[in-house]
Structures are given as C-alpha cells and as structure tokens.
Amino acid sequence: MVRSYHKDRLPALEVAVPESTAARSRPDVGRYVSDAWRERYFAACDALYALGAPASWEQDVETSFGTTHVYRYDPDDAAARDRTPVVLVHGAGSCSAMWYLNTAALSAERPVYAIDTPGDPGRSVQRAPIHEPERAARWLDETLAGLGLDRVHLVGSSYGGWLALNQAHRAPGRLASVTLLDPGGLEKVGLRFFVWIFVSLFATFAPKRLRPRLAAWLEQPVLVVPELRAMVHAGVRAYRIRRPVPQPLTEAELATIRTPLYLVLGRRSLLVHPDRQVERVPRLVPGARAEIISRTGHGPQIDHAERTNRLMLDFMDSAERGLPAPC
C-alpha cells in the first residue's frame, strides 16, 4: 500500500505508521528514543531539505519490514518525466536529506526518488530487521514495486552503496544501472573509518572559527554547513541504530553482477582503498567503470556535487544506450 502526500500540504505531516510497542522492544530494530527527539530530528532534516530541490510528492510504501518513506522530485520538462528514474539510497545514520546538493541537478533530467532507509533516522518506520542480505534485497524490491517502478537507476552512498551492490547481486531485475559512491560492500570496514567517524563527530562541537580548518583536514563538510551539522547532532541524540556492520560481498558474488555498474571513490577515502578497488571491481564485474575523485574522502557527491551529478547522469545515459561508460 502507498500513501501519497503533495508537498504543499506537508507542514503538519506526521509519520504515517507509528512505531509499535513490539517493534520498540526488539533489539534488532532501530528506534527513536522519544517522540520529542523524533520531532526535533525531523525539524533539522527539513531545514536541510530546504537547501535542495523541493520535493514534488512524499509517499509511504508498506513493505514486509515496515513503512518506507520516499521523496519524489519531478523534472520541469514533461519529456524528462518519462525517462527511467533515479533512486537514491543514503548512508548509515542519515536520511534522504543528505542528497540536498544532488536532487536539483538529477531531477532536471530524470524523475528522482530519495528513500529513507528503515533502520536509520528518517521518516520510515522499521518493524523487522533488514540487515541480512536476502532481507535487504527483498525490502528494496518491495519498495520499488510499491512505487510502481519496473526499471530504475539505483544510486547508493556508503551503507546505501552496500544496499545497491547487494541488490545488483541478489535482485537485479528492476535495475537499469547501479552507481556506487564510496560504498560499503567492497571491503571489511576497518578501524580507521570508525576513528574518522568519531573524530568527525567530536569536531562538530569545536568552536566555529576552527571548523573550516577541521573540515578540510577531516574531509568533513558537516562541520561547515550549519543545517547538516544540526541534522547530524540531532540524529545521534534521537535515534538508536540496531544492526551489525554489513559484510562485504565475496569476489564470487561480485562476479555474478551483470547490471551496468559505476564506482566513484574519493581519493582520500577511509572506507575503502581506492587504488585497490578501481582495479579490482572492473576485473570482477564485466563492463564496470571505476574512477577516483581527487580532493575528497567519503563524500564525492557533497564535496564535488556538480561534477559528480554530471558523471552520474552521463553514465545513466550511456547505460540506457548500451554504450561503454563515458571516460
């Protein structure tokens, strides 16, 4: 079942399906610590959404694992509305507001759907875990089916990259292409990444005058965008994520992928080893393209939004035409 809301009628919108008592008591299901903190987080998210393109519609899609909240962005050009849409899947501990620098450019050429992943803070409501690979693929396929989408260009960042990679391996039937932005799923997450996460979080409390220097050192734009910083702070306080770190796909699993695939890595990524993966992924996945973006770490779509948006759109165009990915 899908519930739709026009953006003009959304100021008083609450989550359509409340958290059940049973779901709140499960140790493997994410939850808000209180209704008050949930509302504070939503307010912080809305301030970040306001920096990007306005959503045309919001929808709640019922799945076997809970309610998935989705934002849709429509092109102004009527012809572009009929093109194969883009589906965006955010990283861990965030929500679809993280795409605020990407939705305008992408939706200028194609319809865009930005998904709040159940189990992370956002307006989705989780009732069952999806961290196991088979369940994750089933949840995403049910979400796309509920939206009436038979063919999509799937884009995933970080943990969302693991979800997209997992989908390409386990349930690729609806996928026209997959774009992975400094994704999980390629290597075991090492200590250096977790250290970066914790140091970055502590740096958000630094004096304002020090944040630009820390942002450059840590490759962390959250420090210098007040709305992004406020959303991260609220999310840490408001929500409890209850899932293990996903395991990377094996080389045998990667070798099964036949969906056109585009891997974009930050030169200073701490999640993966960029040079290793730009050689490894095209070797294992037939026709895959991989490249490294300089002067960025884990967020190429934020640090170099204009360039990354163009690269993604060009790749999607080439995938639809059955051509080699543009260089």
Image: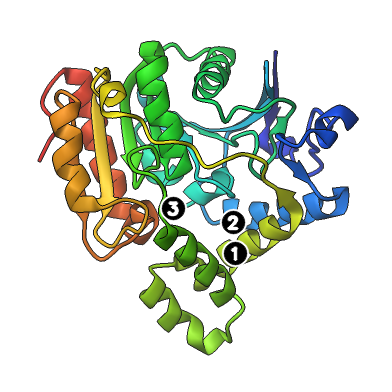
Seen at 49% across and 37% down, the residue is 246
Question: Circle 1 — which element?
Answer: helix
Say which residue label 2 marks. Answer: 48
Q: Amino acid at mark 3?
A: Leu
Q: Quadrant of residue 3?
A: top right
In the image shown, does 47 or 69 lie closer to the viewer?
A: 69
Cβ–Cβ under 8 Å for marks 2 and 1: yes
N-term-proximal mark, 1 vs 3: 3
Q: Is residue 230 visible?
A: yes
Left or right, residue 179 beside residue 283? right
Seen at 44% across and 53% down, the residue is 101
Badge 2 density bin: few <14, some 14–19, many ≥20, Cα 10 Å: many
**312 in relation to 133, above or below:** below
User: Which label sits on residue 227?
Assistant: 1
Query: Label 3, label 2: how many angstroms apart (C-alpha)?
Result: 10 Å
Q: Is residue 83 visible?
A: no
N-term-proximal mark, 3 vs 2: 2
The percent coordinates of residue 211 (x first, y second) are 49, 81
Say which residue label 3 marks. Answer: 101
Q: Classify the position of the N terminus by image quarter.
A: top right
The percent coordinates of residue 296 (x first, y second) are 30, 62
**258 in relation to 226, above or below:** above
Cβ–Cβ under 8 Å for marks 3 and 2: no
N-term-proximal mark, 2 vs 1: 2
Seen at 67% across and 45% down, the residue is 241
